[in-house]
Image (spheres, helix red, strand yellow):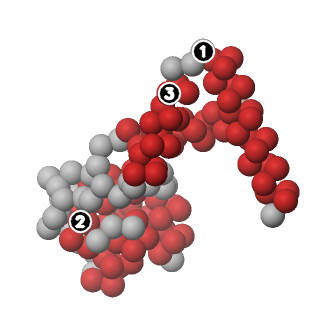
Amino acid sequence: MHLITDWSAVVANRRRKQPSTEGGFGPRLAEFRQSRGLTQEELGERLGLSNRMVAYYERDEASPPGPILAALAQALDVSTDELLAVKPPADRRGKKSARLLKRLQRIEELPPADQRAVLKFVDALVQSRRRSA
């Protein structure tokens, strides 16, 4: 059932701490990328860069040029100040997403058979909406 792994990733991403303001630019960039659930290759595709360049920028001593910095911030939906640790990362979850996340976390407390039933229902609902769209 593919949604179980998708849902687990969503919960895991939400539980992950926000990227820190400590350390160098590279590790902070990697934390932001990972917290968005992106691979180096996926981020590179968004920017028109190879994953080798993304890996290079994620190294501790890396310092991308201004236009790349702006593109990285835009692709990761953060400000350049957050990316450069000039200011701490903002919590971008709205009240609606926080409520949804809390409800999804309650599903984790259910027995595995009930979790599968809930996820089958969600899969069926999503598939039904896709067909009608």
Depth check: give the residue in front, 127 or 99.
Answer: 99
Of the two numbered discs 2 and 1 in the rendering, the one whose residue sits closer to the viewer: 1
Indicate the position of residue 76 as horizontal and vertical percent values.
Answer: 40, 65
Of the two numbered discs 3 and 2 in the rendering, the one whose residue sits closer to the viewer: 3
**Quadrant where the C terminus lies?**
bottom right
Indicate the position of residue 62 as horizontal and vertical percent values.
Answer: 24, 67
Amino acid type shown at disc 3: Arg
The CA distance from mark 3 to mark 2 is 32 Å
Q: Which residue is mark 1?
A: 111
Of the two numbered discs 1 and 3 in the rendering, the one whose residue sits closer to the viewer: 3
Q: Residue at x 66, y 38 (%)?
A: 3
Query: If you read the primary sequence from the N terminus, does the residue marked by circle 1 or circle 3 appear first?
Result: 3
Q: Is residue 6 visible?
A: yes
Amino acid type shown at disc 1: Pro
Amino acid type shown at disc 2: Glu
Q: Which residue is mark 3?
A: 106
Q: Residue furthest right?
A: 131
Does residue 131 appear to the left or right of 62 in the view shown?
Answer: right
Q: Is residue 2 visible?
A: no
Answer few, some or many: residues within 10 Å of disc 3's Cα (few below 14, many 20 plus, some between 14 and 19).
Answer: few
Q: Residue furthest bottom?
A: 67
Answer few, some or many: residues within 10 Å of disc 1's Cα (few below 14, many 20 plus, some between 14 and 19).
Answer: few
Q: Is residue 32 above or below residue 15?
A: below
